[in-house]
Every structure is written in structure tokens, then in C-alpha cells.
């Protein structure tokens, strides 16, 4: 598959965003006080790894279906998680050594929610700029999953009483 220069550039930007999300969510999983919140962050980090792999495959011209991607990801996930956990733990230890005031679970979720909104917007631009149908479909699929991440974060905040939905006044 031949990518345009614009597609390559946007895929690279999205890979960077996914890598930041992975690191952020691993660190947040380690920092979260509530196990449900930590589990959500670990789950999101796993999904972001899948996104990064899909984007790297697109960038390298590999065409794989979702099942093949999942199988390949499962082979590499354990080592990646170990490496990322070490990086996240080192980062958190350094942060804690510098500042004993850590973010609350509410703040972690709020930051992640803002991050997902930003990432989703980035995918929207990438989808709209894609000339290749296969690239566009892959990016749309990832964007839909980013929307699901946003919803999961919102629902967790709502469940904890940190984000409420109020009906509009007439």
C-alpha cells in the first residue's frame, strides 16, 4: 500500500500520541488509589498498544486483519508491559521524590478524559485527510475506540460522583 506524504506524517503524529497515552495510562494505573480506576487505566493502556501496533503496521505497509493483529499483540504484550511498568515505576518514583502531592484519582481521570478528546480530534483530522481507503478505515476504527475510551472514563467519573449529567432547564 502506498501512503501519501500527508498520511505518513499524520500516522507518525498519531503513533506519538498513542505512545504518550500508553506511558500516561501505565503511570496513572500505578498512581491510582482505587483498584477500579487502576484497572481502567491498565485496560486503556492495552488498547493504546493495539492502536500503536496498527499504526506502525500501516506505516510499514503491512496489511493485517484485526484477528492477526490481536494474536501478534498477545505475543508481545507481556514484555512490553514489563518494560513500560519499569519506566512508569521509575517515573512515578522520581515524581514522588520531587513532589509528595500526587494527583487524586479524580484528577487522573479528568486528565485522561481531556487527553482522549484531544486524541480523538487528531484522528478526526487524519481521517479527513486520508486519500487511501484502507488507511481511512483503520483510522476510523481507532477513532471509534478512542470515543469508547472517552465514554469509559466519563462513566467511571460519573459512577464515582465526579462528573454528573444534569438535565437542561426549560
Image (cartoon, helix red, strand yellow):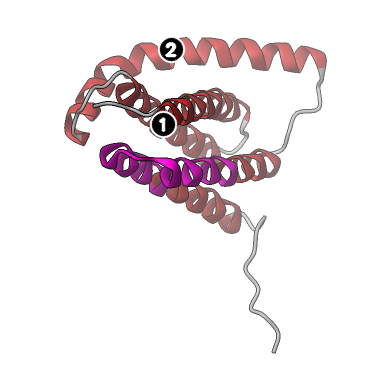
Residue 135 horizontal/vertical position (percent): 32, 37
Main SS of residues in magenta? helix
| Left or right placement of residue 74 versus residue 107 in this view | left
Residue 125 horizontal/vertical position (percent): 50, 44
Q: Quadrant of the N terminus?
A: top left
Which of these two is toward me, 83 or 17?
17
| Left or right placement of residue 127 versus residue 109 in this view | left
Q: Which residue is mark 2?
A: 82
Which of these two is toward me, 26 or 19?
19
Q: On screen, 140 above or below 49? A: below
Residue at 48% x, 50% y is 152
Residue at 81% x, 27% y is 101
What segment is highlighted magenta in the picture? 117-144
Determine whether the residue tagged by mark 1 lies in a helix, strand or loop. Answer: helix
- In the rendered image, residue 72 lying in the magenta stretch gets the answer no
**Res 92 quadrant in image:** top right
- In the rendered image, residue 138 lying in the magenta stretch gets the answer yes
Q: Which residue is mark 1?
A: 7
Q: CA distance from mark 1 to mark 2?
A: 31 Å
Query: Label 2 crowding class (10 Å Cα cut-off): few <14, some 14-19, many 20+?
Result: few
Residue 33 horizontal/vertical position (percent): 62, 34
Q: Earlier in the sequence, mark 1 or mark 2?
A: 1
Instruction: For marks 1 and 2, give the one nearer the viewer.
Output: 1
| Left or right placement of residue 140 versus residue 134 in this view | right
Amino acid at each position: 500500500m502506498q501512503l501519501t506524504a500527508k498520511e505518513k506524517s499524520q500516522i507518525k503524529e498519531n503513533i506519538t500520541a498513542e505512545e504518550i497515552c500508553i506511558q500516561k495510562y501505565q503511570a496513572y494505573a500505578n498512581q491510582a488509589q482505587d483498584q477500579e480506576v487502576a484497572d481502567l487505566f491498565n485496560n486503556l493502556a492495552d488498547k493504546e498498544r493495539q492502536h500503536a501496533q496498527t499504526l506502525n503496521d500501516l506505516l510499514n505497509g503491512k496489511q493485517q486483519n484485526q484477528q492477526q493483529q490481536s494474536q501478534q499483540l498477545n505475543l508481545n504484550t507481556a514484555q512490553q508491559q514489563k518494560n513500560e511498568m519499569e519506566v512508569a515505576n521509575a517515573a512515578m518514583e522520581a515524581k514522588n521524590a520531587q513532589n509528595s502531592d500526587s494527583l487524586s484519582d479524580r484528577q487522573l481521570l479528568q486528565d485522561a478524559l481531556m487527553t482522549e478528546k484531544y486524541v480523538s480530534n487528531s484522528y478526526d483530522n487524519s481521517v479527513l485527510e486520508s486519500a487511501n481507503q484502507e488507511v481511512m478505515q483503520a483510522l476510523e476504527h481507532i477513532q471509534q475506540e478512542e470515543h469508547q475510551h472517552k465514554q469509559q472514563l466519563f462513566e467511571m467519573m460519573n459512577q464515582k460522583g465526579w462528573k454528573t449529567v444534569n438535565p437542561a432547564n426549560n
